[in-house]
Amino acid sequence: MMTTRLLAFSGSTRHGSLNSQVLQTAIAGAESIAGCTVTLINLNDYPMPLYNGDDEQAHGMPETTQKLLRLFEEHDGLLLASPEYNGFFTPLIKNTFDWMTRNEPDGRNGMRVFKRYPVALLSSSPGIVGGLRSLMMVRMYLSNLNFLVLPEQVAVTGQKVHEGKITDERLEQQVFALGAGLAEWVQN
Ligand SMILES: Cc1cc2nc3c(=O)[nH]c(=O)nc-3n(C[C@H](O)[C@H](O)[C@H](O)COP(=O)(O)O)c2cc1C
């Protein structure tokens, strides 16, 4: 049996983040597929300064960015939960990926790691559409970085999230299936 390793993180590091909560269901879906394991990380553990060209010139790519790129290399796909800020995804997501598209100390460009890298997207926000607009934007952004963004995506209204669980059964199944679908895509 093929072993599949997926990476998962939330675009919010807020304590009690809705996105971190709904991500758990997608992870459970992925882990329901035989041979699939998921590594959940918190971007708080990979702090990076806000990108600035002078800073890059002086110090190069941060070590945290290089560490995150190695993690991507060690995994086969990504589950990403994206909050919505004013119809967009978060500056944390943008800054983290922007840094990763820069050159590493050996001169190789980080973006090589993302070529056709499968990613499944979900979002959550308190509003009724659950951050759907951010998904369109993060899809476009990650496509620019050569990720292979799977067509399925789920936006979860926070009104259906309670203590880490999605209370609407259909929605819960959709998020579970999103995670399972990514694992199956990677395995096949
Ligand atoms: C700057 C800012 C802008 C926001 N804009 C939107 C928005 O456009 N649509 C929306 O549904 N929620 C919006 N929200 C509310 C967030 O979706 C909400 O805070 C959510 O809980 C953040 O995700 P998290 O729970 O994973 O941290 C915004 C929040 C902030 C801080």
Image (cartoon, rainbow, N blue to C red):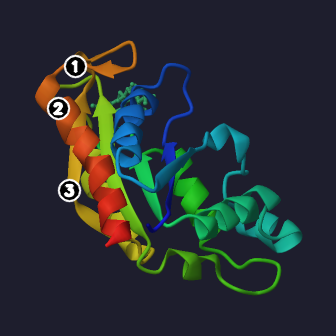
Quadrant for the C terminus in the image: bottom left
* Mark closer to the chain start, 2 or 3: 3
The answer to whether mark 3 and mark 1 are in CB contact below 8 A is no
Amino acid identity at mark 1 = Lys
Q: Nearer the viewer, residue 40 or 83?
A: 40
Residue underneath mark 3: 152
Q: CA distance from mark 2 to mark 1?
A: 8 Å
Does the Cβ of the disc 3 residue fall within 8 Å of ligand 1? Answer: no
In the picture, measured across the screen, residue 110 lies left or right of residue 147, that is right
Name the quadrant where ligand 1 sits: top left
Q: Amino acid at mark 3?
A: Glu
Mark 2 near ligand 1 (CB under 8 Å)? no
Query: Element type at marker 3?
Result: strand
- For image coordinates 73% across by 51% down, the residue present is 49
Place residue 152 in its image quadrant.
Answer: bottom left
First of labels 3, 1 by sequence position: 3
Q: Residue 17, position in %: x, y? A: 46, 25
Mark 2 — residue?
A: 171
N-term mark: 2 or 1? 1
